[in-house]
Image (tube, rainbow, N blue to C red):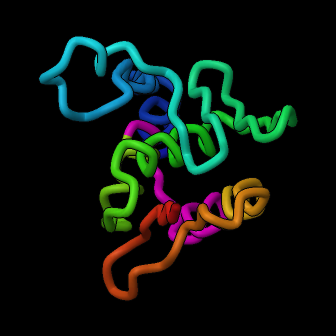
Amino acid sequence: MSFLALAGFIFLRPVKQRKALPESGNTDMSTPESRHTDMFTLGSMSFDTEARKLMINGNTIELTRTETRVLRIFALSPNKAIDRSQLQKEIWEDVGVIVGRCLAMFISKLRKKLEFDPNIKIVVIRGKGYKLEISS
């Protein structure tokens, strides 16, 4: 009987819809132009969230959906620390399972893709989370 209950739970549970990326380019919804921004400037790079691409010096770097979601969170708050738990929640809450090293893996992949501009880096804030540092 318990096997049937478990099988029913697995196959008949409601499926959560994946959250779409928010449409704004900024969490501050006070200005109308900030509501429809899909492009960010990060140092000498352009970041297109809609196309999931980074552009620098005529070169295009493709991003995965999750890399785009992570980088977008950073782009909304450059040079500000973001809690690890907040990143995990915003990226994987709708999936239901959060694996501890997943975030570190995506941060590592993003660092490699951002290394084309030495003025952009994702740094660890010990005991807190991460920060997208953009120097001029």
Question: Which of the 4 quarters of the picture holds residue 114?
Answer: bottom right
Residue 133 point in image, percent of width and height = 48, 65
Q: Which residue is most to the right?
A: 59
Residue 39 point in image, percent of width and height = 53, 25
Q: Foreground: 8 or 71?
A: 71
| Residue drawn at point x = 59 percent, y = 67 percent | 121
For residue 96, above or below residue 19: below
For residue 101, above or below residue 22: below
| Residue drawn at point x = 49 percent, y = 21 percent | 38
Would residue 101 appear left or right of 33 to someone viewing this image?
right
Would residue 64 appear left or right of 80 to someone viewing this image?
right
| Residue drawn at point x = 62 percent, y = 64 percent | 119
Question: Which of the 4 quarters of the picture holds residue 49?
Answer: top right
Q: Foreground: 116 or 12?
A: 116
Magenta residue span: 94-107
Residue 72 point in image, percent of width and height = 48, 40
Residue 83 point in image, percent of width and height = 31, 66
In the rendered image, residue 97 lying in the magenta stretch gets the answer yes
Question: Which of the 4 quarters of the picture holds residue 13?
Answer: top left
Q: Can see residue 29?
A: yes
In the rendered image, residue 63 lying in the magenta stretch gets the answer no
Q: Can see residue 15?
A: no
Q: Which residue is most to the left?
A: 30
Would residue 1 appear left or right of 32 to someone viewing this image?
right
Q: Foreground: 117 or 126?
A: 117
